[in-house]
Image (cartoon, grey):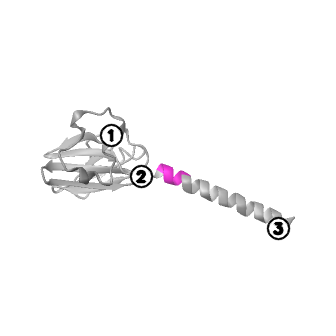
């Protein structure tokens, strides 16, 4: 009887651990209100299609303009999000990640935070999920 109890306990622990892993994976990228905005003609920057290799271009949203930088948020292939910073033809950079991420471009740094973490950093809020980080700012406070 003891062996069966131990096997049942190990099986239950395995199921709980697997469920926790699945739930963590699902919540890792969080939700991003900026991606719920309606699509517009200005949601795609004039860059080559291969630039979107790791991103779902159909989800791209123009979320902010900061100085000369145009900021586009989109879902990453798989899970997570990508931030594309476009300054002018030939001058753009994109970063992708799950949960939050930062991208440096044009001498500026931008942070993307999911809804649950948004509003908690020291940066200047540019949209629901995107922040400009002045030098020495902490993106999540």
Helix, strand or loop at disc 2? Answer: loop
Q: Classify residue 92 as left or right of residue 128.
A: left
User: Which residue of the protein is positioned furthest toward the bottom in this rendering?
Assistant: 3
Q: Classify residue 32 as left or right of residue 62.
A: right
Choose between 19 and 122: the one closer to the eye: 19
Q: Does 3 appear above or below 69?
A: below
Which mark identifies residue 128?
1
Task: Residue at 82%, 63% (x, y): give it.
Answer: 4
Which mark identifies residue 78?
2
Whole-percent x, y for residue 39 in the image: 30, 34
Which of the image's four quarters has the N terminus?
bottom right
Going from the N terminus, do you reach mark 3 or mark 2 first?
A: 3
Q: Nearer the viewer, mark 3 or mark 2?
A: 2
Q: Nearer the viewer, mark 2 or mark 1?
A: 2
Helix, strand or loop at disc 3? Answer: helix
Q: Evaluate whether residue 89 shows in this view.
A: yes
Q: Which residues are magenta?
A: 23-27
Between marks 3 and 1, how big is the CA–CA gap? 54 Å
Please tell me how crowded label 1 is: few (under 14), some (14-19), or many (20+) other residues with Cα within 10 Å: some
Whole-percent x, y for residue 67 in the image: 14, 45
Going from the N terminus, do you reach mark 3 or mark 1 first?
A: 3
Whole-percent x, y for residue 93 in the image: 22, 55
Task: Residue at 66%, 60% (x, y): give it.
Answer: 14
Between marks 2 and 1, how big is the CA–CA gap? 22 Å
Choose between 36 and 134: the one closer to the eye: 36
Q: Evaluate whether residue 141 shows in this view.
A: no
Residues marked 3 and 2 touching at CB (< 8 Å): no
Mark 3 — residue? 3
How many numbered marks appear? 3
Going from the N terminus, do you reach mark 2 or mark 1 first?
A: 2
């Amino acid at each position: 009887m003891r062996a069966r109890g131990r096997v049942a306990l190990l099986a239950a622990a395995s199921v709980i651990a697997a469920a926790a892993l699945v739930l963590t994976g699902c919540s890792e990228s969080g939700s991003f209100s900026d991606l719920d905005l309606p699509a517009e003609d200005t949601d795609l920057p004039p860059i080559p299609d291969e630039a979107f290799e790791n991103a779902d271009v159909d989800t791209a949203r123009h979320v902010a303009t900061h100085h000369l930088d145009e900021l586009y948020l989109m879902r990453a292939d798989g899970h997570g999000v990508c931030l594309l910073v476009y300054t002018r033809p030939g001058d753009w950079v994109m970063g992708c990640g799950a949960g939050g991420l930062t991208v440096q471009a044009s001498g500026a740094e931008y942070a993307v935070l999911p809804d649950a973490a948004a509003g908690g950093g020291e940066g200047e809020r540019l949209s629901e999920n995107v922040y400009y980080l002045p030098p020495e700012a902490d993106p999540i406070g």
